[in-house]
Amino acid sequence: MAESIDAQARGVEEAVRYGQAARAEVVTAIVTANESMSQSAAQLSRTVVELVARAKEPVALPAGPELPAAILQQARPGSALNA
C-alpha cells in the first residue's frame, strides 16, 4: 500500500513538473509573439509617418506631351467645336 501511494505521489510530481515546463514554453511563446507584434507595429508607425511626411511635399509632374496643331486649333476660343 505504501508503495502504491509513493508511486502515485511520484506520478503527481512528474505531472506537475511537466505542466510547469509546458506553461513556461507557452509563456515564452506569448512573450516572443508580443515582442514581434510590437516591433511590427513600430515599423508600421514609422512607415506611416514617413508616407504622411512625403504626402505633404508637392509632387513634381513631368511636362505633358506636345499636342498636334489640329488639337490645339480645336481648343482655341471661336473654333468650330467651341461655338
Image (cartoon, rainbow, N blue to C red):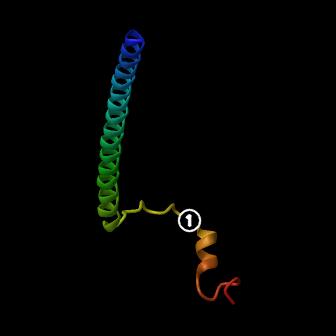
Residue 48, quarter of picture? bottom left
61 horizontally vs 81: left or right:
left
Query: Is residue 81 shown above or below 60?
Result: below
35 horizontally vs 79: left or right: left
Nearer to us in this view, 47 or 34: 34
Q: Quadrant of the N terminus?
A: top left
Q: Is residue 71 above or below residue 60?
A: below
- Residue position for label 1: 67
Q: Residue at x 35, y 45 (%)?
A: 37
Q: Residue at x 36, y 32 (%)?
A: 23
Identity of the residue drawn at 31% across and 39% down? 31
Crowding near pointer 1: few (<14 within 10 Å), some, many (20+)? few
Name the kind of residue labelled 1 in the image: Leu
Give x and y (percent) for residue 11: 40, 17
Tell me where residue 64 appears, x and y as whole percent.
Answer: 48, 63
* Between 14 and 40, the one nearer to me in the picture: 14
Where residue 50 appears, x then y in whole percent?
A: 30, 56
Residue 6, given in percent of the width and then of the height, sits at 36, 14
Q: Residue at x 35, y 64 (%)?
A: 55
Q: Between residue 35 and residue 52, name the one nearer to us.
A: 35
Q: Is residue 78 left or right of residue 45?
A: right
Image quadrant holding the C terminus, namely bottom right
| Secondary-structure class at tag 1 | loop
Q: Is residue 73 above or below residue 6?
A: below
User: In this rendering, is residue 61 above or below 3?
Assistant: below
The quadrant holding residue 21 is top left
